[in-house]
Image: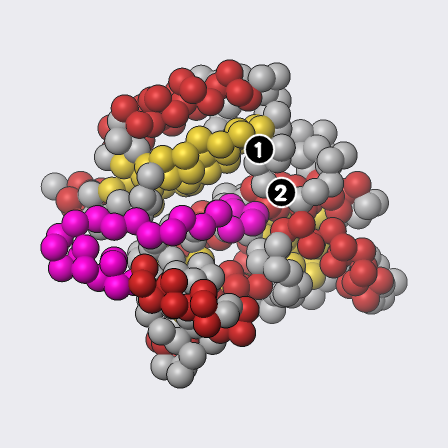
Amino acid sequence: MDDHAQDSAALPICVAALYQFTRFDDPAALQGPLAALCCGQAVKGTLLLAREGVNGTIAGSDDAIAAVVAHVRGLPGCAGLDVKYSRAAEQPFYRMKVRLKREIVTMGQPDIDPLASVGTYVAPEDWNALIADPGTIVIDTRNDYEVAAGTFRGAIDPKTKSFRDFPDWFRAHRAELLERGETPPKVAMFCTGGIRCEKSTAFLKSEGIEQVFHLKGGILNYLEKVPAEQSLWEGECFVFDQRVTVAHGLAPGSYGLCHACRRPVSAEDRRSPRFEEGVSCAACYDERTEEDRARYRERQRQECFAATRGEPHVGKVYPPAEGEG
């Protein structure tokens, strides 16, 4: 049995993170057949359809995921669909959703078109040399709670709550970022799977920045292909499912999830007096009321009761985090 087969036996669920910028004339016409195929194959997760393309993460058996990926690759402009595969011991999603959106990753800049202009792709094997160059500034385009779990050494954290905030952050800090010397610096950006970088580099190009680069396939591609001993990545990578984080080789990470706010929680975070399983963490305690926490405790009680009976229980379903991917 080869290594892949061994991995498949140990971790039977195939997880596929995918996206493709293209032009769909009628995304609504694609929704029904795609949803029917996913549900028929017992695939779970979320796929977003918009006029600018498709984006999402799904999980299921190897054959089921292969069938869905083949279907998506048959959609207009999706033959080169970018898919990042990993594995999980259990199904990391509760249900299947195929949603129609205005954008497949929300930046709120309607004139930005990654199909018209985008930064230079950099392969994971070449990324270290680029970001180690003193003439390069490295920007993490993800949300603040994602960066807290891990990032590249020396990367700038914009501390944004949402990807929508990135354009305003860049415009506010442009001078201090770019006007550091006589030679304009190169700008290298990265995100989880590459999709936010496609938009952020397109945005910087629209702002007149020419030397813009982004990590092809995102952090997930880097963690899969770059050996840990050569890596400039520090920490773990937050993912938008029940695995919470992954480490080098896309192995399951060590973080848990606060089910009140959907933020990752480390072992240290769990020692906080403000952490209560299923109810609160230090990051969200002041954002919720006692009435909120009472509801969360009841939900947690029901989930624990269902677990003792070996039954699945899906509590309150929260909207997906802004800017997934």
- Residue 36: image x %, image y %? 35, 22
Using the image, tell me which numbered label, if any, was put on residue 239: none
Query: Which residue is pictured at 69% across the width and 66% down the height?
Result: 134
Which amino acid lies under the numbered mark 1 shown in the image of this protein? Lys
**Within-10-Å neighbours for mark 1: few <14, some 14–19, many 20+:** some
Query: Which residue is pictured at 33% across the width and 22% down the height?
Result: 37
Question: What span is in magenta?
Answer: 300-325
SS at badge 2: loop
Q: Earlier in the sequence, mark 2 or mark 1?
A: 1
Query: Which residue is pictured at 79% across the width and 41% down the height?
Result: 206
- Residue 247: image x %, image y %? 37, 60
Q: Do tag 2 and tag 1 residues touch (Cβ < 8 Å)? A: yes
Considering depth in this image, is 86 or 47 the residue closer to the camera?
47
Left or right position of 94 against 234: left
Q: Is residue 199 visible?
A: yes
- Residue 55: image x %, image y %? 50, 35
Residue marked by disc 1: 101
- The vertical placement of 276 against 292, above or below, is below
Q: Nearer the viewer, mark 2 or mark 1?
A: 1
The tally of labels here is 2
Which amino acid lies under the numbered mark 2 shown in the image of this protein? Thr
**Within-10-Å neighbours for mark 2: few <14, some 14–19, many 20+:** some
Query: Which residue is pictured at 24% across the width and 35% down the height?
Result: 61
The CA distance from mark 2 to mark 1 is: 9 Å
Please name the colour scheme applied to the rendered image: secondary structure
Magenta span dominant secondary structure: loop
Residue marked by disc 2: 106
